[in-house]
Image (cartoon, rainbow, N blue to C red):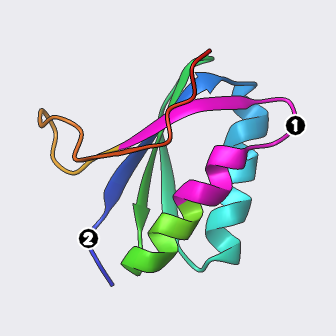
């Protein structure tokens, strides 16, 4: 098990729908997930578990529920530090 990583999803969200989706994916992958800051264009999720499963979680959540559009994801490992990982990035 690794320490917690904060995955930030950027896009267009129905916040309740996306947070339920995120919690479901975390349970399916046996990860611990806590919802952080939530808005209609950015949602932060603190995730801990095996690194490979955290990667799978990020990918699964980037596909999102039908009523949400994830445009980009990145990870914050320490508060105040620049994003350490950047995945995808779809132009709007």
Between 14 and 86, the residue placed more toward the observer is: 86
User: Does any portion of residue 32 appear in the rendered image?
Assistant: no
Q: Quadrant of residue 71?
A: top right
Is residue 59 in the magenta section? yes
Q: Which mark is residue 3?
A: 2
Image quadrant where one finds the N terminus: bottom left
Q: CA distance from mark 2 to mark 1?
A: 30 Å
Q: Residue furthest right?
A: 66
Whether residue 86 appears in this view of the structure is yes
- With 57 as the anchor, is 60 left or right in this view? right
Answer above or below: position of 52 versus 21. Answer: below
Does the magenta segment cover residue 65?
yes
Q: Position of residue 85 (x, y in %)?
A: 30, 48
Which residue appears at 16% of the width and 39% of the height?
Answer: 79
SS state under label 1: loop
Please state the horizontal and vertical placement of residue 27, each as a whole percent of the image: 66, 72
73 w.r.t. 1: above or below? above
Quadrant in the picture for the C terminus: top right
Q: Which residue is mark 1?
A: 66
Mark 2 in CB contact with mark 1 (< 8 angstroms): no
Find the magenta span and give its range: 58-74
Among numbered discs 2 and 1, the one appearing first in the sequence? 2
């Amino acid at each position: 098990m690794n320490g917690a990583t904060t995955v930030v999803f950027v896009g267009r969200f129905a916040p309740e729908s996306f947070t339920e989706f995120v919690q479901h994916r975390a349970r399916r992958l046996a990860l611990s997930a806590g919802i952080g800051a939530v808005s209609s264009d950015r949602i932060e999720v603190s995730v801990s578990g095996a690194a490979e499963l955290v990667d799978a979680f990020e990918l699964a959540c980037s596909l999102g529920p039908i009523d949400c559009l994830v445009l980009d994801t990145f990870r914050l490992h320490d508060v105040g530090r620049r994003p350490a990982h950047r995945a995808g990035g779809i132009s709007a």
